[in-house]
Image (cartoon, helix red, strand yellow):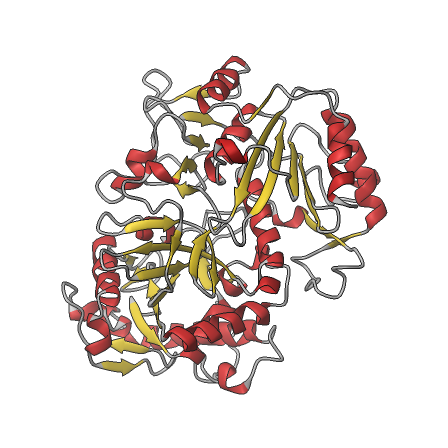
Amino acid sequence: MSKETQTANVNRLKPPVGCNLSISHLVEIALARREGVLAATGALSIMTGKYTGRSPQDHFIVDEPSVHGRVAWGAVNKPLDKETFEALYQKVLAYLGEKEFFVFDGFVGADVKYQLPIRVINEFAWHNIFVQQLLIRPTVDLLDHQPEFTVICTPGLKADPQTDGTDSEAFIIVSFEKRVVLIGGTEYAGEMKKSIFSVMNFLMPERGVFPMHCSANVGVDGDVALFFGLSGTGKTTLSADPERRLIGDDEHGWSSTGIFNFEGGCYAKCINLSKQHEPQIWDAIRFGTVTENVVLDAQTRVADYCNGSLTENTRAGYPIDYIDKAVIPGLASHPHVVIFLTADAFGILPPIAKLTKEQAMYYFLSGYTSKLAGTERGITEPEATFSTCFGEPFLPLNPAVYANMLGERIDDHNVQVYLVNTGWSGGPYGVGKRMDLSLTRAMISAALNGTLEKGLYQPDPVFGISIPATVPGVPATILQPRSTWTDPAAYDTAAKVLAARFHQNFVHFPDVADNIRSAGPVDIPPVEKG
C-alpha cells in the first residue's frame, strides 16, 4: 500500500477531536474523561489496568514480500500473514470510526537527514499527551508534513484470537509495506514508543545508521558517552548526570557524522525514585508529565515511588527539555566511551571492567542482566536474562547486523568499552547488597574522564574481562567481586554457573566469528541451573 492509499484509508474516519492539541488542552480533556488524576506535582497520573508493561508475546510483523527475506523470524519477530492483518486493520478503522480520537504529527530522529515523519492516532487523550512528549514535536512550519508511518492505538479494542489471528486480546503489529503500526487491547503507553523504535531498527541500517537501545550524554568538553542496558540496570538514571548534558535516555542512531536521539522525551522508571539520587528525574515529574501506575496518597495526591503494589515497572514520560541543560536538538559527535550496564543479581561480575573490541561484541550480542524474584509471576529466585544487543524485542534484523555495526564504529573512532555491574556485590540477591549508586557514578566518571585508560588491570580468571586495580573514590576491596564474598569457594562455583549460562545462550549465534566467540568466559562444561 502506498503512503497515499494509507492516508486515504485513515482519512475515511470522521474528524478527530483535535490535531496537535496543546498539552494543557489534552490534560483538561483527559481529566474531564476521567482517564487519570493530577498528582501533587501537577503530573497526570494514569493507571493502565491489566497491562502494566510491554506484552512481547503479542507482537507481530506482517510477512510481506519486500521484508520476508530480511526479517529475522522467530519467537521475537513473529509473522502475521497479509490477509489476517488487512482484516484486523479494517476492524481497527471501523472501531475508530465510532470513537472520538486525537492526532499528533511529529518526527522520530533529531538528525533531519534521517528523520522519519510520523502520525499517531489515539483513542485516549493521555496517550496523545504521551506521544507528544516522547516524540519530536514539529515547529509550526512543519505541521503540514506528510507522515511516512502511522501508528493507530485503540486500547479499547480487544482482539479475538479465534477470528483475528492474534495470541490474545492485545496486539502490536507492524506492516512495513503499508507503513502502519496497529496497537490494541493494552493501555500501556510504552508499546507506542517501542513499536516506533522497532521501525527505526529496521529502516536505519540500510541507510548506514546504527540504531541503538541506549542513553547518551555529553561532558563540558564535548566528550560523548553511550549507556546500553536493559530495564532496571540504571540506563536512564546514570545518563541523567547533573555534571553532564543529557542527549537522550533510550533510543539513538549512530551515523557517519555522530549520534542523534530518536526521541524528544524520556521514559524513566520511577520505582524507588528519590530526589537525593535522581534529582533531574525527580524535578521532571511535573505538569505535562504522564506517570503510569505510580501509587498516590488518596488525600494529598503525593506520589509514593517506593510502592510497587501495582507493578515494579512504574514510569514517567516527560519532554527532554524538562531535564536541565539537555541537548536540544539531540545531536552530538562520535562517542569516545561506551558503557554496557548489567544488574547481575548473582554478585559475580565486577562493578567495572574494560573490554576489548571482540569482548564488546560478545557481551553486546549476549545482552546479559538478571530478573529478580517477585518481579514477574513464577520467578522465585534470580534468573539470568539475555536480550540480544540489549534490545532483542525491538530488533527485526539479524543480530549480526547490529553487532557488526558496533564493531566497525569501535575501530573507526577508537572507542573504549566498559562493562559496569549495577547489581549485587558480596553475594547474590538476598545475601549481598546492591551496588551503591554513588560508587557506580564514581567508576563511570573515571571511565569518562580517561582515568581508567591509564591504570593497571587484572584479567578476570573466568570472564577474561580486565578489572582495574584502583578507581578514585572507590574502595579497592569491591573491585574484585570474589574478595567481597565471605565464602570464596561459593563464589567460584557461582561464577562457573554464570559462565556456563553465557555459553548456553551463545549457541543462538552459530555464525559468529571464532575471535568473537572466544572472547566470552572460559569454556566450562554446562552446569545445571541451581
User: From where the camera sits, is residue 349 visible?
Assistant: yes
Left or right: 256 with respect to 352? right
Work out which residue is located at the far front of the displayed protein and give it.
141
The structure residue drawn at horizontal position 56% and vertical position 59%, both measured from the top left corner, is: 392
Spot occupied by residue 420 in the image (x, y as percentages of width and height): 33, 65
In percent of width and height, residue 329 lies at: 40, 46
Q: Is residue 92 above or below residue 222?
A: above
Can residue 233 be seen here? The reply is: no
> Which quarter of the picture shows residue 487?
bottom left
| 282 versus 433 height, above or below | above
Query: How many discs mark residues in the rendered view?
Result: 0
Q: Which residue shows up at 53% across the image and 74% down it?
A: 404
Residue at (33%, 35%) from the top-left corner? 284
Q: Residue at x 65, y 57 (%)?
A: 76
Q: Position of residue 80 (x, y in %)?
A: 77, 51
**Residue 294 position by quadrant:** top left
Could you tell me residue 432's position as x and y percent? 29, 59
User: Residue 448 or 350: which is nearer the viewer?
Assistant: 448
Q: Front-most of 227 and 34?
A: 227
Left or right of 151, for residue 451: left
Q: Identify the residue at the far top of this view.
A: 32
Taking 347 as reference, is 18 above or below it? above
Left or right: where 400 falls relative to 455: right
